[in-house]
Structure formats: structure tokens, C-alpha cells
Amino acid sequence: MTDPTLLVLSSLAGGDKHGYAMMEDIERFAGVRLGPGTLYGAITRLEKLGWIAPVGPMERRQPYTITGAGREHLEEQLASLGRIVRAGQRRLEST
């Protein structure tokens, strides 16, 4: 999974983070290193959609939190991915 939207939402589901912390977290759990342009482009889109929101600044960095709508979207997308994974596994087992 390399969709920046799902990676950022998954990262924020674990707690509020600023951009660099998200990059590090995503690399740890997904093995994907998002470049700054990709990450901050995703953050901008997610904020416009209302799926994440900024929280009070910590030092120089702007942390973000996942919103209720963002959590719902993430849950829907992960359920869909789960169905795809299960179908793929069944098909591999039958060959």
C-alpha cells in the first residue's frame, strides 16, 4: 500500500503528529518513505476534505489530528483492502 492518503490517515490514527513524525512513522509501519512534496500534498488534500485538522502548534512544527470523518474514511478503505487481500489469498491457494 503506497497511497499517501491512507498512509497519512493510518499514521494519524495512532495519534497526533507533525509532518516529519508522520514520515518516520509511515516508513516504520509501511516501509515507504514519502518525500516532503508527496506528504505535504496529501496533508493539504486531507485537510481540505476535512479528514484531518491542525492542532495547536508544538514548537515550530504543526501537528495534525485525524477527524471523525477521516477515521470513517480510513475504516471504509481498510475494509475494502481487507476484502481484496482475502480474495487474492483465496485465489492463490486455489492455484
Image: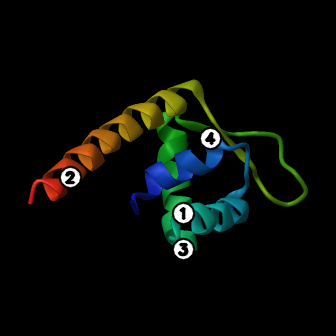
- The numbered mark at residue 33 is 3
| Contact (Cβ within 8 Å) of mark 4 with mark 3 | no
Q: Which residue is mark 4?
A: 13
Question: In this rendering, which labeled residue sits more in front, label 3 or label 1?
Answer: 3
Is residue 84 shown above or below 33?
A: above
Q: Earlier in the sequence, mark 4 or mark 3?
A: 4
Q: Earlier in the sequence, mark 1 or mark 4?
A: 4
Q: Whole-Å distance between the Cαs marked 3 and 2?
A: 26 Å
Q: Earlier in the sequence, mark 3 or mark 2?
A: 3
Amino acid at the residue labelled 1: Leu
Q: Which residue is mark 1?
A: 39
Amino acid at the residue labelled 4: Ala
Could you tell me which quadrant the C terminus lies in?
bottom left
Viewer-side residue, 40 vs 77: 77
Q: Whole-Å distance between the Cαs marked 2 and 4?
A: 26 Å
**Residue 71: x percent and y percent?**
53, 31
